[in-house]
Image (spheres, rainbow, N blue to C red):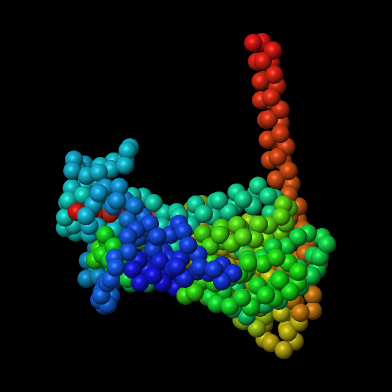
Amino acid sequence: MHEVALAEGVLRIVMDAARASAAAHVHTVWVELGALAHVEPDALAFCFDAVTRGSVAEGARLDIARTAGSAWCMPCSVEVPLARLGDACPRCGSHQLQVLKGDEMRVKEIGIA
Amino acid sequence: MCTTCGCSDGETRIDGVTLTGGAHAHEHPAAHGAAPVQWRTRAGGADHAPVPSHVHQHADGTWHSHVHGGGSSHETLAGAPALGAAHEDGTPAARIVRIEQDILARNDAFADLNRQAFADRGNFALNLVSSPGSGKTTLLVRTIAALQGRMPVFVIEGDQQTSLDADRIRATGAAAVQVNTGKGCHLDAHMVGKALAQLDPADGGLVMIENVGNLVCPAAFDLGEAHKVVILSVTEGADKPQKYPDMFHAADLMLVNKVDLLPYVEFDVDAAIACARRIRPGLEVICVSATTGEGFAAWLAWLERGVANARGARDRDLAALRRRVAELEAKLGSAADAA
């Protein structure tokens, strides 16, 4: 599953930041995943635990925040919330939607000691 | 997967040679025990209603909101607001470092390099994605044969193991490089960059990247292509787009393949196209058969338009560069005269 690759991506970012801050240990990693992001959060957490073993972030807590998705509804000409791909516009029922937000996957902060 | 850091670069092979370099940015301890993985369930799930930014739910079901306030003891990036002294969930205040980096930033950086390389050479690059068995390789073989003498075609093949697909492509006379991902489930931009260095596509050529057969994971990874082309065969079911929305949403063209089998299967082509367009409005669709050649005129025309656009863009860039060089030479000339 590709969550392994994503967890490796998180680890790489965390290790670069830890090195830059001369941290002895990373105890928490805060990530933000959009509602439409191509990732299964539990799988990411599982892989994160696995890939951080032996690293400066071993045993770190992964805190996942979900952010809302939204899309531009072309018939309504307005931004509407979108919980998942394939959902219709909650106002008019159209599928003519252009995703604006929700597929982000970001490392926000790390807690170091 | 590397048992130390979990990275999979060590297992990737290009034409049989292990991929090295650029991945292991950290030390590898000599030995490590077989400690069991600690499972910690984390916040959030797609089945929750959309929530405002920065609201977290912990495994015990409690929620808290992410508060950022002033604080003197924290490192921040230049220009970023200082972070709160502690997170409300009791995280030790020791040090919080603001990161704000996309998880796929490294892949996207490699993808941008690939995209620039394609632009510099006027290559039209496509990322072919689908389930295993949709007919990607057969489609490529027929496409290469149909384009003989019209444009050079270069192929990057992706599979977990074997060079079977690259061998089939090479048998047509086209150049191909095989990437074996080992346990990996998708191609990434780093692998494609390495493969391109070996493939060395000619100027103005068509580059086809046949991704690992997988209707889920490749959707997340930009390889530097101009378009993702999703292939759905009529033996797979017309509801695939709504069952695998990420992939169809990421594509710009859908090829409905194996249409020669329509008399023998219950596949509603119009329903499949409607389903796909609910996920990806404006999706272009071409119905083809890689075995009979049905629909190939439209497919080849689409390819030729793409190649012409890529070459045209490269020619315009070169013309602009030549004009700039001429301007600078004129300036140098007048400066020399004045001196």
Q: How many marks?
A: 0
Left or right side of A51 for B200: right
Q: At 25% across and 49% down in the image, what residue appears? A: A22
The residue most toward the right is B149
Split into 4 quadrants, where in the image is the C terminus of chain B? Answer: top right
- Residue B18 x/y as whole percent: 50, 68
Split into 4 quadrants, where in the image is the N terminus of chain B? Answer: bottom left
Q: At 67% across and 30% down in the image, what residue appears? A: B324
- Residue B292 x/y as whole percent: 79, 79
Left or right side of A14 for A1: right
Can residue B264 be seen here?
A: yes
Q: At 82% across and 60% down in the image, what residue appears? A: B150
- Residue A44 x/y as whole percent: 37, 68
Q: Pick the residue in front: B59 or A15.
A: A15
Q: At 41% across and 64% down in the image, what residue appears? A: A6
- Residue B249 x/y as whole percent: 56, 64
Q: Pick the residue in front: B57 or B4.
A: B4
Left or right side of B23 for B149: right
Q: Quadrant of residue A111?
A: bottom left
Q: Pick the residue in front: B74 or B30.
A: B30
The residue most toward the front is B30
Q: Quadrant of residue B145?
A: bottom right
Q: Quadrant of residue B287?
A: bottom right
Can residue A42 be seen here?
A: no
